Image (cartoon, rainbow, N blue to C red):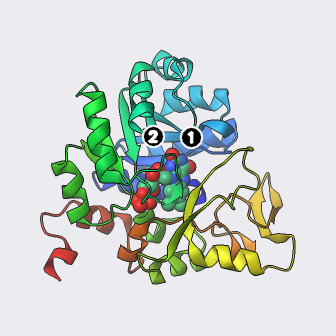
Amino acid sequence: MGTVGTAELVAAVANAGAHGMFAGVMVPPPALRHVIDRIGWLTGGPFGINFLVPLIDPECVEIAAHGAGLVEFFYGDPDPALVARVHGADGLASWQVGSEAEASRAVAAGCDVIVVQGIEAGGRLRGTAPLLPLLERVLRAVAGQVPVVAAGGIATAHGVRGVLDAGAAAARVGTRFIAAQESGAHPAYVEAVVRAGALDTVITDKFSVMWPPGPSPARVLRSCVAAAERLAEDYAGAIPAGGGMLPLPRFAAPAPGRQATGTIEAMAMYAGVSAGEVRRVEPARAIVSELTSPRSSSSAG
Ligand SMILES: Cc1cc2nc3c(=O)[nH]c(=O)nc-3n(C[C@H](O)[C@H](O)[C@H](O)COP(=O)(O)O)c2cc1C
């Protein structure tokens, strides 16, 4: 989850009994090694490293496959060579997909797991279909060959149980962890997500500056699109990079982390429709415990 997913968050999720994921996007090889060591030091639990294919550094794939149990790819056509690279280092390979055709290609490419993402999800969106009907089509296409994880709009124990009942092997939850205590999101981003309702997100391809050319829709808070449109300057602010601060153009793809400066509300605040279920900041352990509880607080209410 980009700047949101700190080593501390990944480790806290794994320590709580779930599977942590770290986004290796734009992380140089030495920094990735350091993060993997740090996560491994903080937890003995399972975790993986995720790469956005258009921004991938092949050296980082090797490092991830050696250091983490699972390496996942997103936003590129399933590639047998990348999967083989992971297997060559004794890792498991996953691909997050947005359609049943892409799911079949991921299985054919040799993936051990696939994640199916519905358009309810926060962040970059790969497909055009809502999660439940897509999950059903993907399960049919994959026909039990690999476990299928469901992602998009899941933020309660009801939601988790719903996708498990529908045949998923696991649920992926992103947006809910923006408001984890261990999250690296800027406090103004966290507050905006906590305040947002289910109808306060929008799919847009505007936040595509500093992203490779081509259509790249993402679900973000509606408020950040409006704030970026209102910006008089060409830059929204700056983010830490390479020991200094990197100016962040208007509509740039990176989300605001804790150390971002400038007009934070105009930066890419990725969030899913599940933002409506994010009501407070709490430790990752409490979030995992609620998501996996037999009775969620929402069912009590
Ligand atoms: C802030 C944020 C950053 C994300 N970054 C990535 C990423 O780097 N790689 C990736 O595969 N998915 C990324 N995603 C998408 C998640 O993998 C997942 O599809 C999504 O969070 C699930 O929906 P939810 O946000 O409603 O829980 C991101 C999502 C969010 C909210």
Taking 166 as reference, is 6 above or below it? below
Cα distance, mark 2 to mark 1? 8 Å
User: Does mark 2 have its CB less than 8 Å from ligand 1?
Assistant: yes
Where does label 1 land, which residue?
75
Residue position for label 2: 96
Residue contact at pointers 2 and 1, CB within 8 angstroms? yes
Tag 2: amino acid: Gln
Question: Taking 74 as reference, is 151 left or right?
Answer: left
Whether residue 191 is visible, yes or no, is yes
Label 1 within 8 A of ligand 1 by Cβ: yes
Amino acid type at image mark 1: Tyr
- Quarter of the image holding residue 229? bottom right
Mark 1, other Cα within 10 Å: few <14 / some 14–19 / many ≥20: some
> Does 180 appear above or below 76?
below
Q: From what the image shows, is residue 87 above or below residue 283?
A: above
Label 2: element kind: strand
In the image, 30: left or right of 135? right
The residue shown at (44%, 76%) is 199
Q: Which residue is drawn at 52% across and 41% down?
A: 50
Q: In which quarter of the image is the C terminus?
A: bottom left
Instruction: From the top left corner, tell me how far across and down residue 116 is, in percent.
Output: 38, 43
